[in-house]
Every structure is written in C-alpha cells, then in structure tokens.
Amino acid sequence: YTAIDENGVMEIPSETVIDGETYYVTAIEPGSCEAVSADRIGGHVREHAEEMGWEIEDCEWTYPKSIVIPETVRCIGGEAFVHHNYWDEENEVHFGLESVTLPREVKWIEPSAFVGSWLITEFTNLDAYGAESGNPYRLTEDGSIVSVWAENYFHTYPYGSTAAEYTIPDGIEVIGHCAFHNAKNLVSVTLSEGVRWLENEAFAWCDNLETISLPSTLE
C-alpha cells in the first residue's frame, strides 16, 4: 500500500524488503492498483494488515491525481490502474487520476492497463513517437501511447483530453483494444490512411462520439 502525498502524487516504490531480502518491483500485476471506494479500501487494508501482523492507524483515505511508476518496472498488466475516477457527491463533480509517469524501459503494457480511468489527460516520460529508441513505447504529440514493435499499434489515448476532434497520427496500422475507452469529450475521429485494423472496444463508452472517418486501407 503506497502513500499519497499532499499534492495527490502516489509514487510506487521501486523495491521492498521482506525478511531482510530486497526485492525490486519489476511488474504491476493486473488489477493490483484498482481504484475502489474508501470503505472497501479500509476494510481490505485492515484485513490484510491483520493477516500480516501489522499495525495500522486510522486515517483519512485520499485518491491519487498523479501516479509515478518506478523505472524498475518492465511490465504493466491489464486493468492495473482501472477505474481511477470518483464522484464527489457533495460538489457533484468527478475527480481522480489525471497524470501517469511511465518507466522509460517498460517492455510491455497491456492494452487495458488504464481502462476506466477516464480523467487521465497525460502520460509522460517516454520518447516521442518517431524518435529512435530501444523502448517499444513512444508518446505522440498529444500524449497518446503508441507501440512501435508490431504494426505501429495505437495503444492508449489520454482519455480525459478536452479535444473534441482527433486524427490518428500517420504510420499507425492498428487501433488497440480500449484505445479510446470512455474518452467522453471526443465528437469526431479521423483514422489516417494506413490504418488496417480496429481491435474490439476501441471506441467503447465514447458517449459523445458522433463521427469516425474511415480510411480506404481498413481491412
């Protein structure tokens, strides 16, 4: 369980010590950082702490605006950071995860790693799309994640972007699973020539999306 600082930043530790042995954090498992309600978190943490023989003090639960994934991580599993958005009933507003700092040497990010966290406006710390790099993942100018290992795969759009219109960058061949999931501000998307394939749920829950312009290369 990782503490969140006063600015809403949660830094996942790069290592942990168990029984005197140091272990480096190299993977974020599927569902391991799922966001849940404060009551459920509290109960789950206390139950686990009791099993481990830990003491835990009463505290006020908060939720991250920003998550920093350590440079030691090489793999991020499916739905690892799912549903990091919350409803403030008193003020009638959603709030939650807005920024994710990715490790530069990450080798695999499951397509659904951030699904449901639809307030994310930026991913940071990767090389620019088009740059020469040993890292398979790059960032486009708007902050979308692209994989260049296989068929220039459009991985994840920053779901919380305020843009109403979006054009897929040149060179992309595949639009990934849940790539635009819950991008509520999008009204129109243009798929550039060269896009051949749309994976399932690529535009799921895009409530305001009215138009998708398809290329002649689509199979």
Image (tube, rainbow, N blue to C red):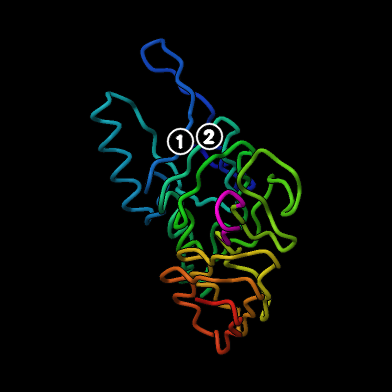
The question of residue 149 being in magenta is answered with yes
Residue in the image at 47% along x and 44% along y: 76
Q: What residue is disc 1 on?
A: 27
- Against 19, residue 34 (above or below) is below
Residue in the image at 51% along x and 75% along y: 92
- Against 93, residue 158 (above or below) is above
Secondary element at tag 1:
strand
Classified by dominant secondary structure, the portion drawn in magenta counts as: loop
The question of residue 199 being in magenta is answered with no
Q: Is 147 left or right of 25, judged from the image as shown?
A: right
| Count of residue discs | 2
Examine the image and state in which quarter residue 217 appears.
bottom right
Magenta span of residues:
148-154
Q: Position of residue 192 (x, y in %)?
A: 66, 75
- Against 50, residue 126 (above or below) is below
Type of the residue with mark 2: Val
Q: Nearer the viewer, residue 124 or 64?
A: 124
Q: Position of residue 126 (x, y in %)?
A: 68, 46
Q: Earlier in the sequence, mark 2 or mark 1?
A: 1
Secondary element at tag 2:
loop
Q: CA distance from mark 2 to mark 1?
A: 5 Å
Q: Nearer the viewer, residue 139 or 33?
A: 139
- Against 144, residue 73 (above or below) is above
Do residues under tags 2 and 1 come within 8 Å of each other at their CB atoms? yes
Q: Is 95 left or right of 205, judged from the image as shown?
A: right
Q: Position of residue 186 (x, y in %)?
A: 60, 79
Q: Residue 13, labelled with which disc? A: none
Q: What residue is disc 2 on?
A: 73
Type of the residue with mark 1: Ala
